[in-house]
Amino acid sequence: MAVSPGLWRIRLDVAGQAAAAFAEALEPHASSTSWTEPVGGRARVEVISENKPNRALLEALLGEVAAAFGLAPPALDVDWLAGRDWLALNRRAFPPVEVGRYFIHGSHFRGSVPAGRIGLRLDAATAFGSGEHGSTRGCLMALDELAPKSHFRNGLDLGCGSGILAIAMAKTWGCRVVAADVDGEAVRVAAENAKRNGVAALFKAVASNGYRAPALRRRAPYDLIVANILARPLCRLAAGLERHLARRGVVVLAGLLDDEAARVLSPHRRRGLRLQRRITLDGWTTLVLRR
């Protein structure tokens, strides 16, 4: 039985638009990271760590994120959690999630994937992407809607996190995919998840800051690009997306709050992309564009 002797918990309340960035800054120092959907403009970021947190280091990291958003540094709430059966708690906390044709479940799930559904096996880990967050669900909904009317041969998941979207692409179309992330731990987790889902032969996990990695550039052009990151980097990467997208290619952009959609759309429209579908879910917008 997976009973832990104890873990450290770090909590902070932040502005909703910055929650993902604060969580990303803490991920290298955590066993798991999560945050709540914004309520009244505020969100709670929670981190679990096996090691005692270095408060000075974390405060410095969070100060950098706060400065980037023009915010005051958030207060850290650090406490010790006595030993518990974390495996049992994980099973209760992460029941299967259904999004369109996709059935996302952990390794603890002992049932059968429903007929006609595509099973995606993912466990809570140090990389973001379990199918529960509004931006991830929006991307899965977009892929579900594209499935019956499109066929893709070469896909890219930029900002792949756990690799859930790249795995969904590989399983849906049997296409080869590149899963890229700036975080090396996310790249490792994505590659492991690809093996668990039986798509390793179609899957290449790459550490890349945007489109810079040579391995990512060599596979271009892509007929399907999914980028579930944040509004600011999506705008900054619009030119790179244009260079790596195939003629008549499709783009799924996510990780942006509803009021950020127009700002993200603008640089992509200037590069000849047309909006095909807008999905709004829990305050997060997913955009589907086509060249």
Image: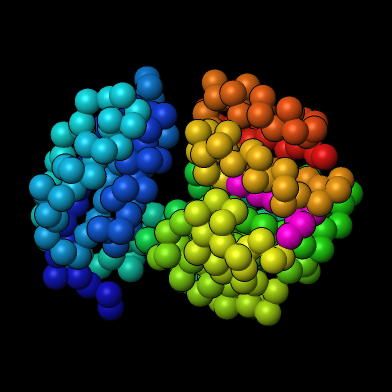
Q: Residue 74: give x, y in percent of width and height.
A: 21, 32
Asked whether 75 falls inside the magenta stretch, the response is no
Is 224 covered by the magenta stretch? Answer: yes
Instruction: Report whether residue 105 is seen.
Output: no
Give the quadrant of residue 197.
bottom right
Name the residue located 22 percent from the left edge and 36 percent from the top edge: 63
Q: Quadrant of the C terminus?
A: top right
Q: Is residue 64 above or below residue 194?
A: above
Q: Residue at x 54, y 21 (%)?
A: 259
> Where is residue 56 drawn, in percent x and y?
10, 47
Q: Is residue 94 left or right of residue 54?
A: right
Name the one closer to the observer, 211 or 259: 211
Rendering coords of residue 49 (x, y %) = 22, 60
Left or right of 18 on screen, residue 79: left
The correct choice, above or below, for 246 with respect to 6 in the image is: above
Task: Specify the quadrant that holds the N terminus.
Answer: bottom left
Q: Quadrant of residue 31?
A: bottom left
237, above or below 69, in the image: below
Q: What segment carries the magenta color?
A: 220-227
Q: Is residue 218 visible?
A: yes
For image coordinates 27% across by 75% down, the residue present is: 2
Q: Main secondary structure of the magenta part?
A: strand
**Colour convention:** rainbow
Residue 130: x percent and y percent? 50, 55
